[in-house]
Image (cartoon, helix red, strand yellow):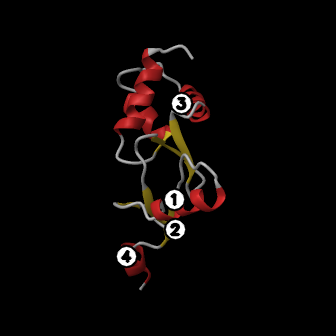
Amino acid sequence: MKNTQRRAAILAEVSASQGPVSAEEIFQRLQERFPTLALSTVYRNLERFAEDGLVEKETSPDGVFRYAGKDDHGHYLVCTQCHSRVRLHECPLSAMEEKLEEETGFSIDRHQLTLYGICPACKEREK
C-alpha cells in the first residue's frame, strides 16, 4: 500500500484516539487539514488497515464500525442506550488466554472483549 499524507493522517488519528473511533469521527477531525477528503476514502482506508492488521475493527451495538490502534489493547463496558464507553483498566482475559494456549496448543495473538449493558446515568433516567 502506497503511503500518502491522507493515509498517514487517518492512521495517526486512530492511534492517537483514547479508544475505538468511527470513520465519521476521523473524517470530522481531518476535514480542516484535508478539505477535499471524502468520507468514502476514510472508510476504504480503515478497511484496508483492518485487513492488513494495522488496526482492530469492532462493531458496536448501534451498528457503527469502530477502529482502534493495534497497541490500544483495551476492553470496554458500553451502554446500549447512550453508547457511552468505559474502558477496563486491566485485561480480564490474560490468565484465560494463557490457560487456553496450554490446553489447546493454540497460539493466540489477540482478543477482544466488550460488555454491553446500561450505564448508571441511563438507569437513573429510567427511574
Whether the residues at callouts 1 and 3 have beta carbons within 8 Å, the answer is no
Work out whether 68 lies above or below 31.
below
SS of the residue under disc 2: strand
Residue receiving disc 4: 120
Q: Which circle, 3 or 2, is nearer the viewer?
A: 2
**Where, by quadrant of the figure, is residue 15 drawn?**
top left
Residue at (45% x, 20% y) in the render = 6
Between the residue at mark 3 and the residue at mark 2, the CA separation in whole angstroms equals 28 Å
Mark 2: amino acid: Tyr
Q: Which mark is residue 98?
A: 1
Between the residue at mark 4 and the residue at mark 3, the CA separation in whole angstroms equals 34 Å
Residue 46 % position (x, y): 54, 33
Mark 1: amino acid: Glu
User: Is residue 104 shown left or right of residue 46?
Assistant: right
Q: Earlier in the sequence, mark 4 or mark 3?
A: 3
Mark 3: amino acid: Leu
Q: Which circle, 4 or 3, is nearer the viewer?
A: 4
Between the residue at mark 1 and the residue at mark 2, the CA separation in whole angstroms equals 25 Å
Residue receiving disc 2: 116
SS of the residue under disc 1: helix
Q: Which circle, 1 or 4, is nearer the viewer?
A: 1
Q: Which circle, 1 or 2, is nearer the viewer?
A: 1
Q: Earlier in the sequence, mark 3 or mark 2?
A: 3
